Amino acid sequence: MTIEKSKFTFMKKQLLYLFLFFAFISCQDDVKFNNPSFEGQKDNVFWRAIDYKAILAADGSLSIEGYTRNEKLTLKTTSTTAQTYPLGTSTSKTATYVLTDATGTITFATGFGIGEGQIVIEQYDAVNGTVSGTFKFNAENIYNNPLAGPVLNFQYGNFYKIPVSTTSSLVTSLPGTP
């Protein structure tokens, strides 16, 4: 009887190992990396750009743009230096959100004495040509469009490894010029 019992125990162990083997190989990771990404919460609803870019101007200012099907979010800073850029204090550091649909265009913006918030450049990688950071702001409905509220709120905003191009690389030469 002990021989049969040991065979039964051996069979149970084999079945257990077989079960564990299939359990481990059938698991899969559906991990998606948002690298690069541009996202945040717009009026407490998750928002993510489907396309994005950053443009470094000749004067050193930086413009980071994110797009959806009918939205454009633009963050502007005076440089690529890793620091906090306050919004609502000047016209050179701004956040602008534009929604265009069948009913027209709605624009929210910050500016001198308009809105509030901040853009934080955490890393500018000149070698790889990317910029990363965070943002949050309250922007005002600058044309008082009655189809939207008076203020748009973005919070928990992140832009990560957004490709940076220079304005000189966006200019194309005319035919016949070098």
Image (spheres, rainbow, N blue to C red):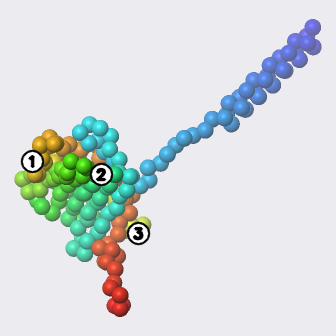
Q: Residue 144 bears which disc, if any?
A: 1
Residue 104 x, y percent position in the rendering = 20, 51
* Residue at disc 1, secondary structure: loop
Amino acid, disc 3? Val
Give whichever of 100, 98 is nearer the camera. Answer: 100
Specify few, some or many for label 3: CA neighbours under 10 Å numbering under 14, 14-19, or 20 or more.
few
The residue to which callout 3 is attached is 127
Name the residue at 31% across, 78% down. 171
Is residue 101 visible to the viewer in this orientation of the structure? Answer: yes
Between label 1 and label 3, give the one nearer the viewer.
1
Specify few, some or many for label 2: CA neighbours under 10 Å numbering under 14, 14-19, or 20 or more.
few
Amino acid, disc 1? Asn
Tell me which numbered mark, 2 or 1, is placed earlier along the sequence. Answer: 2
Residue 131 in which image quadrant: bottom left
The residue to which callout 2 is attached is 70
Residue 3 x, y percent position in the rendering = 93, 13
Quarter in which the N terminus is drawn: top right
Give whichever of 167, 59 is nearer the camera. Answer: 167
Residue 123 in which image quadrant: bottom left
Image: 36 above or below 47:
below
Specify few, some or many for label 1: CA neighbours under 10 Å numbering under 14, 14-19, or 20 or more.
some
Q: Disc 2 to disc 1, how far (Cα)?
A: 19 Å
Between label 3 and label 2, give the one nearer the viewer.
2
Q: Disc 3 to disc 2, how far (Cα)?
A: 33 Å
